[in-house]
Image (tube, helix red, strand yellow):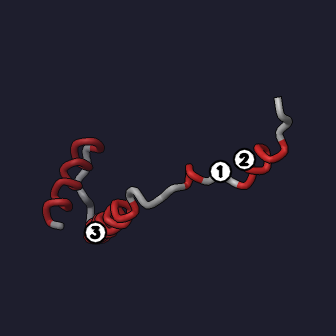
């Protein structure tokens, strides 16, 4: 975590020219680590494109045959 925090602060300084201002900003970085980990855990499990949304399914079901 300390390495991620340090890298995040360096990136912020590089891109925005500011330093992490306070403890709440550092806590938000910790939350970001948890968010990234949660998304990484879902990688490969989300299959939204396998099922069309209900609107697309309705269009498909009602289209006229060529």
Residue at x 18% of width, y 50% of height: 10
Outermost residue on the top side: it is: 66
Mark closest to the chain's N terminus, 1 or 3: 3
**Residue 56 horizontal side relative to residue 17, left or right:** right
Residue at x 43% of width, y 61% of height: 45
* Element class at badge 1: loop
Quarter of the picture containing the N terminus is: bottom left
Residue at x 20% of width, y 61% of height: 5
In three-dimensional space, the C-alpha distance between marks 2 and 1, rounded to whole angstroms, equals: 6 Å
Considering only vertical position in the picture, is 13 above or below 25?
Answer: above
* Element class at badge 3: helix
* Element class at badge 2: helix
Q: Nearer the viewer, mark 1 or mark 3?
A: 1
- Give the image quarter of residue 39: bottom left
Outermost residue on the front side: it is: 65
Q: Can you tell which mark lies on residue 23?
A: none
Residue that mark 1 sits on: 52
Image coordinates of residue 22 in percent, x first then y, are 26, 66
Nearer-the-camera pick, 25 or 8: 8
Image coordinates of residue 25 in percent, x first then y, are 30, 65
Tag 2 near tag 1, CB within 8 Å: yes
């Amino acid at each position: 975590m300390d390495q991620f925090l340090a890298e995040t602060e360096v990136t912020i300084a590089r891109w925005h020219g500011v330093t992490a201002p306070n403890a709440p900003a550092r806590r938000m970085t910790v939350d970001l680590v948890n968010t990234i980990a949660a998304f990484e855990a879902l990688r490969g499990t989300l299959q939204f494109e396998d099922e069309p949304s209900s609107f697309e399914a309705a269009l498909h079901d009602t289209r006229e045959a060529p």
